[in-house]
């Protein structure tokens, strides 16, 4: 009996152990691995040591407290003064060797900034101390120069701009020589050029498009200050916090940027800059260009030439003279014409025959104090059938009659719209024709509601600007920075806006120093800075049916 009890107890223990094991297997959980490693790699030792002097070798060795990897190290590295050739990185266990081919300058302090190019293997944490300094001379230079780079037009800080220093005041240096020192702006547009030798420097900012340090691309944005600027030490009282305004130089060369055909009805030209004088002639003397009409863009940098009637041509060879620039442009037979008669070209032919394009000035709500417009892409010829169209005002229905008048590229309805009332304009098919015989093949229906006074607010601005003998360009902007109104103003006066949609606005003033009606960018070789731009320092909120008044005084 005792033996049986012992065996029975053994069985119970075994069953209990099995249950525990089964429960353990059923509740397996993946290990958490502990807290995320957020500790950056540290430099345990370097050869030479940081801030060493009389350094004449061509390699630096770093030993880290953990394994590291390179993450775009050459792109992140900034060496000042710059090296001509890229440096070489070699990893061996926990050591990194940085070497170069250049011969270092005598008695010069070198600054190596590694950015985020060196990271730990596990979590990619960048090096905690990415600044390394040494000198080829007997001491480390300790002077500095700092400031900020802003966009010359919107005045916002600009990130990742090279700010470069030259030891001589020679204008051609940014075009052909590497700078003596340079640094890159941060997200606030700030730069800090440090470890400089004592002296004065020419300063130049470059937003490079090709990764280089030379101003060799016309589209690159630049900034500069005239004269030589002193580097300062911490003991100096001279204010060295400079502001450079970044701009893209205006390409004064006039030329044809692009050209296109509008079927067999016209040609479109786009130019590099606003056009002052232009002439077009047919080199084959087969066309009379005097009957063509011009349709210019608002900025006068593109034009559409519409033929007097559709021209069936195999090719055109035109000579264009724009502001003294001459070019010969060749056009082949338009695609729409070449496709006619070919299989599958029915849609293109139909579109060409009924391609009258019309766009209404409003979709939804019509300002009760403005005209209603219907704009055509091509020149209009007649609207004889439009008088029989319907004009519905609220519940009253009548004919359009003489309400709508034709202008060269648009239809205009001048009417005293009743506030808050619903309107519908119905234009019969085949009642509007352009000069090419194209018409509206279907009836056109336009519905809108006239606005009310309560939909708008009023704004009165009294301004007092510096009286420096030149006018100002006044711009009212909405919250999307779109220009709502632009006028030329004199230094003193007031501007009234009786109808402004509710929302937030801002005001921008452009200093029109040469009185040409546009904002002019800078010119480096001419030592001309961009024309000044000022913003009213407070957002302007327009409320419904509310009159606001403000005063803006600018001292300079």
Image (cartoon, rainbow, N blue to C red):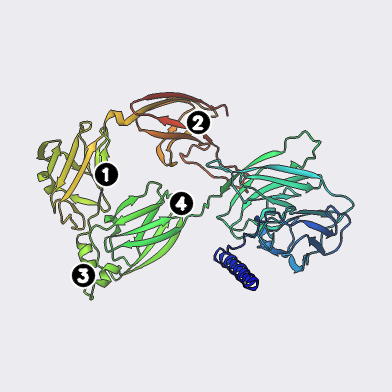
Answer yes or no: do the residues labelled 3 and 1 have beta carbons within 8 Å?
no
Residue 371 - label: none
> Which element type, helix, strand or loop, lies under badge 1?
loop
Q: Give the structural element (helix, strand or loop) at label 4.
A: loop
Q: Name the residue under label 3.
A: 346
Up-down relation of residue 267 to residue 298 (above or below): below
Q: Which is more foreground, mark 3 or mark 2?
A: 2
Give the alpha-carbon distance from disc 4 to disc 3, as whole Å: 40 Å
Image location (x, y in percent) of residue 376: 25, 50
Q: Is residue 18 above or below residue 271?
A: below
Q: Please tell me the numbered disc located at residue 273.
A: 4
Label 2, label 1: how many angstroms apart (C-alpha)? 32 Å
Q: How packed is label 3: few (under 14 Cα within 10 Å), some, or many (20 or more)? A: few
Question: Which of 149 and 452 lies nearest the eye of the viewer?
Answer: 452
Residue drawn at the location 56% of the way across and 50% of the way down? 249
Q: Earlier in the sequence, mark 4 or mark 1?
A: 4
Q: Given this view, does label 4 or label 1 mark the residue nearer the observer?
A: 1
Q: Is residue 460 left or right of residue 416?
A: right
The earlier-in-sequence mark between 3 and 2 is 3
The residue nearer to you, when weighing 176 against 307, is 176
Can you identify the residue that label 2 sits on?
Answer: 538
Q: For the residues marked 3 and 2, what is the alpha-carbon distance in whole angstroms?
A: 58 Å
Give me the residue at 54% from left, 27% from top: 554
Q: Is residue 227 visible?
A: no
- Circle 3 sits in a helix, a strand or a loop, which is it? helix
- Using the image, tell me which numbered label, if any, was put on residue 363: 1
Quadrant for the C terminus, please: top right
Which comes sooner in the sequence, label 4 or label 3? Answer: 4
């Amino acid at each position: 009996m005792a033996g049986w009890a012992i065996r029975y107890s053994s069985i119970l223990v075994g069953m209990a152990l099995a249950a525990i094991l089964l429960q353990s297997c059923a509740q397996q959980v993946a290990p958490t691995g502990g807290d995320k490693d957020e500790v950056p790699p540290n430099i345990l030792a370097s050869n030479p040591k940081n801030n060493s002097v009389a350094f004449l070798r061509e390699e630096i060795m770093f030993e880290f407290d953990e394994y590291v990897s390179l993450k775009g190290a050459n792109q992140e590295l900034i060496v000042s003064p710059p090296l001509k050739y890229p440096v070489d990185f070699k990893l061996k266990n926990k050591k990194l060797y940085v070497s170069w081919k250049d011969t270092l300058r005598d008695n010069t302090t070198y600054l190596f900034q590694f950015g985020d190019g060196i990271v730990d293997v596990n979590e990619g944490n960048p090096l905690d101390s990415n600044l390394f300094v040494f000198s080829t001379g007997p001491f480390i230079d300790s002077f500095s120069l700092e400031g900020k780079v802003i966009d010359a037009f919107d005045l916002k800080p600009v990130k990742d701009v090279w700010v470069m220093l030259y030891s001589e005041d020679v204008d051609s240096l940014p075009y052909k020589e590497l700078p003596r020192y340079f640094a890159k702006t941060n997200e606030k547009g700030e730069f800090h050029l440090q470890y400089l030798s004592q002296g004065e420097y020419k300063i130049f900012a470059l937003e490079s498009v090709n990764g280089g340090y030379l101003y060799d691309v016309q589209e690159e944005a630049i900034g500069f200050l005239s004269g030589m600027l002193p580097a300062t030490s911490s003991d100096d009282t001279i204010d060295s916090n400079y502001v450079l305004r970044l701009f893209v130089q205006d390409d004064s060369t006039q030329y044809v940027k692009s050209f296109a055909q509008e079927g067999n009805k016209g040609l479109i030209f786009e130019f590099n800059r606003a056009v002052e004088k232009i002439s077009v002639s047919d080199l084959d003397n087969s066309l009379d260009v005097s009957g063509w009409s011009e349709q210019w863009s608002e900025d006068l940098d593109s034009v559409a030439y519409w033929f007097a009637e559709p021209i069936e041509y195999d090719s055109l060879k035109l000579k264009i003279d724009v502001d003294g620039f001459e070019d010969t442009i060749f056009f082949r037979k338009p695609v729409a014409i070449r496709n006619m008669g070919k299989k599958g070209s029915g849609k293109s032919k139909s579109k060409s025959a009924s391609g009258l394009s019309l766009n209404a000035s409003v979709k939804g709500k019509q300002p009760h104090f403005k005209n209603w417009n219907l704009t055509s892409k091509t020149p209009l010829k007649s609207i004889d059938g439009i008088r029989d169209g319907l004009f519905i005002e609220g519940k009253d229905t009548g004919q359009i009659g003489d309400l709508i008048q034709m202008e060269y590229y648009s239809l205009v309805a001048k009417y005293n719209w009743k506030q808050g009332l619903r309107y519908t304009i119905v234009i019969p098919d085949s009642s509007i024709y352009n000069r090419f015989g194209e018409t509206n093949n279907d009836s056109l229906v336009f519905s809108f509601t006239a606005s009310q006074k309560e939909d708008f607010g009023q704004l009165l601005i009294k301004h007092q600007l510096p009286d420096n003998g030149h006018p100002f360009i006044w711009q009212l902007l909405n919250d999307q920075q779109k220009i709502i109104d632009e006028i030329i103003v004199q230094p003193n006066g007031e501007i009234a806006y009786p109808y402004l949609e509710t929302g937030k606005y801002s005001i921008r003033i452009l200093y029109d120093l040469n009185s040409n009606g546009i904002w002019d960018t800078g010119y480096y070789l001419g030592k001309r800075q961009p024309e000044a731009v000022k913003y009213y320092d407070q957002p302007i909120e327009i409320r419904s049916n509310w009159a606001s008044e403000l005063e803006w005084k600018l001292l300079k």
